[in-house]
Image (cartoon, rainbow, N blue to C red):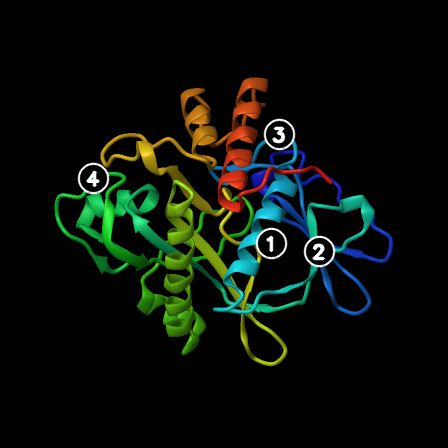
Amino acid sequence: MSGFGLAGPPPAPEITGWKHLRTGKVRDLYQNEAGELLIVASDRVSAFDWVLPTAIPDKGAILTQLSLFWFEKLSAVVPNHIITAKVPDQVAGRAVIAKPLTMFAVECVARGYLTGSGWSEYQKNQNVCGNSLPAGLLDGSQLPHPIYTPATKAEVGDHDINITYEESVTIVGEAAIALKELTIELYEIAAAHARDCGIILADTKFEFGLDDTGAIVLGDEALTPDSSRFWPADTWSAGVTQASFDKQYLRDYLISSGWDRESPPPALPDEVVAKTRGRYLDAYSRITGKDFITA
């Protein structure tokens, strides 16, 4: 798992009644005898396919609580995998118990604004994942309408690869149309709520799976600063670097540090840790209308 550096992933804590299954970039996954999953969000942070050596305090809890807010808000559109947020005290506030799903092997991405890998692709051929776009757009431009830009799922340390809708059909079959429609609908609902909170939801990714009845269910996390780009609406302007409530500040620091992205990443200065945490907290409070309270 090269994304963790030479030392590999950290040891997962033992939790009574739960068997550790695997460690991802930021989450540890456990299972009990009933087959239920305990998904624990750590304070680890990743960037450029690397897990950084410095944690962001309370990040796991902030992301878990924000996901729970969105899961509830979107539940009228699609069911989610949450069974309960009542978890062992050892991981209180930063874990959920969820039902296992057979996950679709695509990341379901919606974009309402042109940036990131979408901007890079647009500059080459005025196209993003098979979506033809108007000429003259800038980095940060609002798109005429949200677009669906699926991607393959990568192992830790590898890159997700953007694909077309047609290519997604070869991976997930007839479910592709439902995944596309759900992704756009959820994005539009979330973007409208975010806008009411003074935030632009530039893009986001969802992960879906099938439950034991064959129903499509929303899994993983939803609409957090780790899986979305959040920009302040009052400072947005196309063609300039956007302020953000997500990991972009962290990415920008790493780029400016001179890190080559090939060797293990450097430790983060205290100021960068504090400012990154502050952005996560700001996103949480604006979106939920509540102050974050540690468990």
In this view, the residue in front, 197 or 188, is 197
In this view, the residue in front, 42 or 281, is 281
SS of the residue under disc 1: helix
**Amino acid on which the number 2 mark rests in the picture:** Ala
Residue 68, labelled with which disc?
Answer: 1
Residue 42, labelled with which disc?
Answer: none
Q: Which residue is mark 3?
A: 53
For image coordinates 27% across by 43% down, the residue present is 119
**Amino acid on which the number 4 mark rests in the picture:** Leu
Local crowd size for mark 2, using a 10 Å CA cut-off: few (<14), some (14–19), many (≥20): some
For image coordinates 51% across by 43% down, the residue present is 226
Nearer the viewer's eye, disc 3 or disc 4? 4
In this view, the residue in front, 78 or 48, is 78
Of pointers 3 and 4, the one earlier in the residue sequence: 3
Q: Which residue is mark 2?
A: 85
Nearer the viewer's eye, disc 2 or disc 4? 2
Numbered-mark total = 4
Q: Is residue 237 left or right of residue 116?
A: left
SS of the residue under disc 2: loop
* Quadrant position of residue 56: top right
Local crowd size for mark 1, using a 10 Å CA cut-off: few (<14), some (14–19), many (≥20): some
* Whole-percent x, y for residue 128 in the image: 26, 53
Residue at the left extreme? 135
Of pointers 2 and 4, the one earlier in the residue sequence: 2
Q: Is the C-beta separation of discs 1 and 2 under 8 Å?
A: yes
User: What separation in Å lies between label 3 and label 2 (alpha carbons)?
Assistant: 28 Å
Nearer the viewer's eye, disc 1 or disc 3? 1
Nearer the viewer's eye, disc 4 or disc 1? 1
Q: Is the C-beta separation of discs 3 and 2 under 8 Å?
A: no
